[in-house]
């Protein structure tokens, strides 16, 4: 339901995102790529070609509109049996380094990922993490919550009190599926999560909600720049009260994913 500036027409849009774990500080990754949607009638992908410069602190390309949402929802060649197929093809990658060293980019095989999203019967869970010693934490490292269970799987919240290395003076917060919870490839979880820092003075909680995320054991999703440290520690706010901070995580398991 993406809308371009100045337009009220919702589009199905895609963007390309580079994993920060694979990005190297000082490297600029210029990528030429194509984002597309599959036309079942014509047996071909239809889309748009784009390019973007990714680097350590900028890992999201702009959104590219593929098809108006209403056109997609009509009986069409793009939506068959309530299923849609999207694709991305990396056409060219050039990596430049401030050290002016040659960087080798390895070619990868084609990957197909299937998402199965339920219409009902969602599994929901909530966890509240009370930290009574927030101001006494080792600010150079992360801290993680006790494990909690949702949908028969163990999860935990991981916090960087002063942010990860690529955050900008912000608290970093992530949700992880515990690595000890071994999931087979055919049973990765598709999750929507909402994470909040509770304001216990004014009741104005700070909240962020994700899109659809695919979780597998030992991997997490979240926000490097969750909340500005200045705002977090503002005495007039209620996010930190007498060295106590409360984080709330709400997650909804809405489907499964597998690779082929």
Image (cartoon, helix red, strand yellow):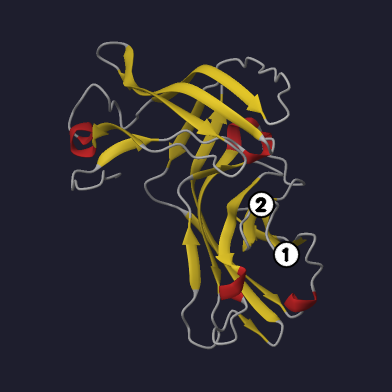
Callout 1 crowding tier (Cα within 10 Å): few <14, some 14–19, many ≥20:
some
Please say if the residues under marks 2 and 1 sit with CB atoms less than 8 Å apart: no
Q: Is residue 126 visible?
A: no
The residue closer to the viewer here, 8 or 96, is: 96
Depth order, front residue of 78/238: 238
Residue, disc 2? 176
**Crowd class of label 2 (few under 14; some 14 to 19; many from 20; radius 10 Å):** many
**Percent from the top left, x then y, of residue 59?**
54, 39
Residue 151, image quadrant: bottom right
Q: Which mark is residue 216?
A: none
Q: Horizontal and vertical percent for residue 62?
A: 40, 38
- In this rendering, position of residue 16 left or right of residue 2: right
- Estimate the x, y position of residue 214 in percent, counting from the top left: 55, 41
Q: Look at the image and tell me whether residue 143 can be seen.
A: yes
SS at mark 1 in the image: loop
Residue pictured at 49% horizontal, 75% vertical: 205
Q: Which residue is mark 1?
A: 145
Element under disc 2: strand
Quadrant where the image shows the C terminus: top right
Q: Residue at x 26, y 43 (%)?
A: 4
**Residue 166 left/right relative to 53:** right
The correct choice, above or below, for 37 with respect to 58 in the image is above
Q: Quadrant of residue 102?
A: top right
Q: Position of residue 58 (x, y in %)?
A: 54, 42
Q: Quadrant of the N terminus?
A: top left
- Cα separation between marks 2 and 1: 10 Å
Q: Nearer the viewer, residue 42 or 122?
A: 42
């Amino acid at each position: 339901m993406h809308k371009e500036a100045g337009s009220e027409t919702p589009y199905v849009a895609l963007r390309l995102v580079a994993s920060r774990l694979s990005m190297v500080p000082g490297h600029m990754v210029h990528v030429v790529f194509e984002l597309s949607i599959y036309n079942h009638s014509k047996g071909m992908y239809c889309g748009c070609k784009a390019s973007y410069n990714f680097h350590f602190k900028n890992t999201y390309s702009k959104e590219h509109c593929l098809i108006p949402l209403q056109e997609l929802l009509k009986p069409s060649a793009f939506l068959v049996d309530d299923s849609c197929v999207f694709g991305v093809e990396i056409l060219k990658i050039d990596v430049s380094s401030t050290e002016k060293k040659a960087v080798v980019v390895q070619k990868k095989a084609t990957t197909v990922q299937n998402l199965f999203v339920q219409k009902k019967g969602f599994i929901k869970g909530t966890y509240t993490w009370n930290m009574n010693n927030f101001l006494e934490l080792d600010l150079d490292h992360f801290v993680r919550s006790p494990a909690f269970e949702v949908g028969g799987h163990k999860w935990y919240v991981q916090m960087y009190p002063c942010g990860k290395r690529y955050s900008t003076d912000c608290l970093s917060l992530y949700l992880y599926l515990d690595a000890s919870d071994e999931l087979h490839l055919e049973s990765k979880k598709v999750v929507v999560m909402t994470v909040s820092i509770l304001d216990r003075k004014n009741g104005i909680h700070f909240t962020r909600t994700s899109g659809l995320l695919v979780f597998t054991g030992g991997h997490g999703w979240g926000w490097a720049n969750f909340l500005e440290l200045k705002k977090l520690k503002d005495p007039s706010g209620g996010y930190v009260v007498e060295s106590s901070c409360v984080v709330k995580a709400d997650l909804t398991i809405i489907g499964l994913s597998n690779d082929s």
